[in-house]
Image: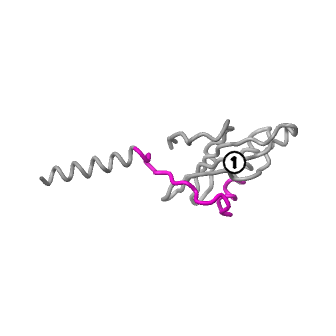
Amino acid sequence: MRSGCVMALLALFLSHVYSQGLYGFAPIPSTHYPYVIEFAKFAVSEYNKKTTDKLAFERLVKGKYTSGTPIYYVLVIAAKNESLPNIPSSNYEATLTVGPIKTLDSFRKIYGLHAYPPIKI
């Protein structure tokens, strides 16, 4: 009986880990939180340092994060490419690690507001 309970709890735990991923992302409750907007602006700034495109931050569209240390953020950012003034703003997905040091892990243009793909970190 006891081993049956242990197996049931283990199965429940593993199904939760499988469905949520290892870190379990949660949506950001508000796109108006100043610290999250700061992270989005940081992502655009870091991207601009590494490319010839010059993006101008417009707004944070949506995002998700993990709890724990460090915190991982996946942000969808609306930005205008100032290198191409006649083109409307586009959405970009930025992945950041925020701990003692902020780092931009990835930054890519996305087409449409799709559901978040699983992230392997």
Query: Where is residue 107 drawn, in percent x and y?
Result: 66, 42
Mark 1 crowd level (few <14, some 14–19, many ≥20, 10 Å Cα): many
Query: Where is residue 105 drawn, in percent x and y?
Result: 61, 45
Farthest-out residue, left: 1
Protein image colouring: one colour
Q: Is residue 99 magenta?
A: no
Q: For residue 82, what is the image quadrant?
A: top right
Of residue 88 and residue 23, the one placed in the foreground of this image is 88
Query: Where is residue 86 drawn, in percent x and y?
Result: 87, 37
The magenta span reads 19-41
What residue is disc 1 on? 77
Q: Give the number of callouts.
A: 1
Could you say whether the residue bearing mark 1 is in a helix, strand or loop? Answer: strand
Q: For residue 65, what is the image quadrant?
A: bottom right
**Mark 1 is on which residue type?**
Ile
Q: Is residue 25 magenta?
A: yes
Of residue 32 and residue 100, the one placed in the foreground of this image is 32
Q: For residue 35, what is the image quadrant?
A: bottom right
Q: Is residue 98 left or right of residue 7?
A: right
Q: Residue at x 72, y 54 (%)?
A: 41
